[in-house]
Image (cartoon, rainbow, N blue to C red):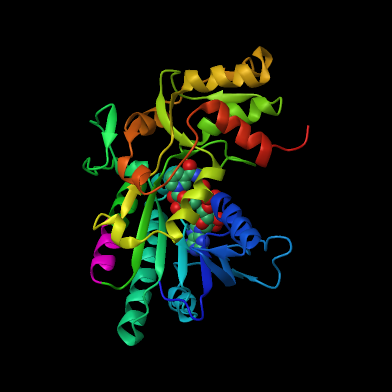
Amino acid sequence: MSSREGRLKVLIIGAGGMIGSKLARRIASDGVLAGQAVSRLDLVDIGLPSVPPGAEGLARALALDLSDEGVAERLVGDRPDVIFHLAAVVSGAAEADFELGYRVNLDATRALFEAIRRAHMAEGYCPRLVFTSSLAVYGAPLPELIPDDHIRAPHTSYGVQKAITELLLDDYTRRGFLDGIGLRLPTIVIRPGRPNAAASGFFSGILREPLAGQRSVLPVDETTRHWLASPRSAVGFLVHAAGLDGKRVGPRRTLTMPGVDCTVADQIAALGRRAGPEAVALIDRVPDPKIATIIGGWPRAFAPEAARCLGFTAETTVDELIDAYLEDDAPPA
Ligand SMILES: NC(=O)c1ccc[n+]([C@@H]2O[C@H](COP(=O)([O-])OP(=O)(O)OC[C@H]3O[C@@H](n4cnc5c(N)ncnc54)[C@H](O)[C@@H]3O)[C@@H](O)[C@H]2O)c1
């Protein structure tokens, strides 16, 4: 990463999304990233992302579709020092619409990498690029605890698109075109607001809706085990990744992030501890074989040693995930 006069230009693609909008607020409020003052914060999404309150002088919002011709060049034309690439068609939607998933998650990402490569060839440009990958790069059969060096073998189109991007990130970094860090995010719980099209949406829904006194559907068995972290931790991972020394990361540039190892039953027990049995009674068990099949092929728990050694941290209990939501996002009662 080479910033002019120690001041960083930062670009967030997917800045209107759940994680992107929180990341924008965090960077605007910190005013620094990777130990340097932020001089410009460009926020890009298909719909116009909102500028964090008080950041009007720093941030610029742009409504652009990364998969449109010329958009990647335009964004790279400003030579951002740090690029957070969060734009994605998420798991359920990428499975439902094959062409859209590949266009956005793979072709648009490659167009971004290529625009950066061309700028590198022209003038040695080499930004830090932080990419959000997913646990969906892994597929059954899987060990109970997945080590950092486990083979990527996705079972969904979304997982394939993320796995290919992880390989591209390694290669473009190895060739010196960009300085990439990929983060395999845990499933982010509790996701605020309305559910998105992710197959994993119920992991948040079974906590968020009952905490607000509303009914929620549980489409899978309570023994379902998964790996979770809060939106607050996701933003923490991204900010930490922006300032990491790439040499410490080594050639495998995507890291599995730490998270909470828990079952759906653990989630329900924590809900009961925080909000009582009446909240637990708001969960309706309605099995959905389609979701169960997608989730059934997903990994359950990890040993994310590389990320831990590099200083990434997250919650360790579901109770902490609920507390983070109540502090950061829960609508006033
Ligand atoms: N939330 C999770 O549990 C989770 C888990 C693993 C990985 N991730 C990854 O983290 C990233 C952010 O996730 P999120 O939960 O904030 O998702 P989100 O759906 O809330 O945000 C994604 C944003 O990308 C934007 N986008 C989609 N296509 C675009 C395009 N062509 N051009 C510009 N913008 C486009 C969408 O409009 C949306 O605002 C994604 O890459 C996702 O795959 C999320």
Q: Position of residue 88 (x, y in %)?
A: 45, 55
Residue shown at 35%/86% (left/top)? 123
The outermost residue toward the right is 333
Q: Quadrant of the N terminus?
A: bottom left
Q: Position of residue 68 (x, y in %)?
A: 46, 71
Quadrant of the rendered image containing residue 232:
top right
Q: How many marks?
A: 0
Question: Nearest the camera: 148 or 297?
Answer: 148
Q: Position of residue 82 (x, y in %)?
A: 46, 68
Q: Using the image, determine if residue 75 lies above or below residue 129.
A: below
The outermost residue toward the top is 277
Q: Position of residue 87 (x, y in %)?
A: 48, 58
Question: Nearest the camera: 272 or 241?
Answer: 241
Query: Is residue 106 at all visible to an observer of this figure?
Result: no
Query: Is residue 44 at all visible to an observer of this figure?
Result: yes
Q: Main secondary structure of the magenta part?
A: helix
Question: Nearest the camera: 67 or 112?
Answer: 112
Q: Which residues are magenta?
A: 167-175
Residue shown at 62%/17% (left/top)? 273
